[in-house]
Image (cartoon, rainbow, N blue to C red):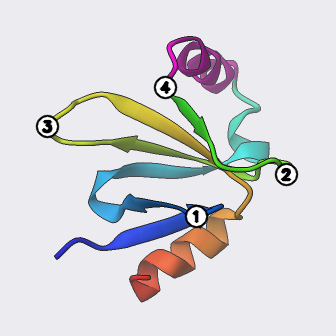
């Protein structure tokens, strides 16, 4: 049975596909991260699930596809981590 994580606006992802959950404010200070996100956007790897100010991005990758996706969410890292702990 798979556990899913609700990341906002009726979008859920499989928890086993999550590579990392990153705070938008602290992680985008690095040029490497900004370059990665820009490249992901250019290559249509970004899924934006919010119209609000984004707080996190979630890097996912399905084992069979080996194609990473970046999901932009308005939810805080702490909120997403708590949801993972509760297995919602």
Q: Residue 17 versus residue 47: which sits nearer the camera?
A: 47
Q: Which residues are magenta?
A: 31-45
**Gap in angstroms between the C-alphas marked 2 and 3:** 32 Å
Secondary-structure class at tag 3: loop
Image location of residue 36, percent across then percent down: 56, 20
Q: Residue furthest bottom?
A: 86
**Gap in angstroms between the C-alphas marked 4 and 1:** 19 Å
CB of mark 3 within 8 Å of CB of mark 1?
no
Image location of residue 51, percent across then percent down: 81, 47
Left-right relation of 12 to 79: left
Residue 60 position (above or below residue 84): above
Q: Earlier in the sequence, mark 4 or mark 1?
A: 1
**Gap in angstroms between the C-alphas marked 3 and 1:** 24 Å
Secondary-structure class at tag 2: loop
Image quarter in which the C terminus is found: bottom left
Residue 69 position (above or below residue 26): above
Quickly name the residue at label 4. Answer: 45
Secondary-structure class at tag 4: loop
Left-right relation of 13 to 65: right
Q: Residue at x 45, y 68 (%)?
A: 5
Q: Residues within 10 Å of mark 4 (few under 14, many from 20)?
A: some
Q: Earlier in the sequence, mark 2 or mark 4?
A: 4
Q: Residue at x 56, y 31 (%)?
A: 46
**Gap in angstroms between the C-alphas marked 2 and 1:** 14 Å
Q: Earlier in the sequence, mark 4 or mark 3?
A: 4
**Gap in angstroms between the C-alphas marked 2 and 4:** 20 Å
Q: Nearer the viewer, mark 3 or mark 1?
A: 1
Image quarter in which the N terminus is found: bottom left
Quickly name the residue at label 1. Answer: 10
Quickly name the residue at label 3. Answer: 64
Quickly name the residue at label 2. Answer: 52
């Amino acid at each position: 049975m798979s556990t899913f994580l609700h990341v906002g606006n009726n979008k859920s992802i499989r928890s086993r596909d999550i590579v990392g959950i990153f705070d938008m404010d602290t992680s985008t200070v690095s040029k490497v991260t900004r370059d990665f996100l820009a490249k992901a956007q250019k290559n249509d790897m970004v899924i934006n699930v919010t119209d609000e100010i984004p707080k996190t991005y979630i890097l996912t990758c399905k084992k069979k596809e080996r194609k990473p996706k970046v999901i932009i969410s308005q939810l805080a890292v702490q909120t997403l981590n708590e949801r993972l702990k509760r297995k919602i």
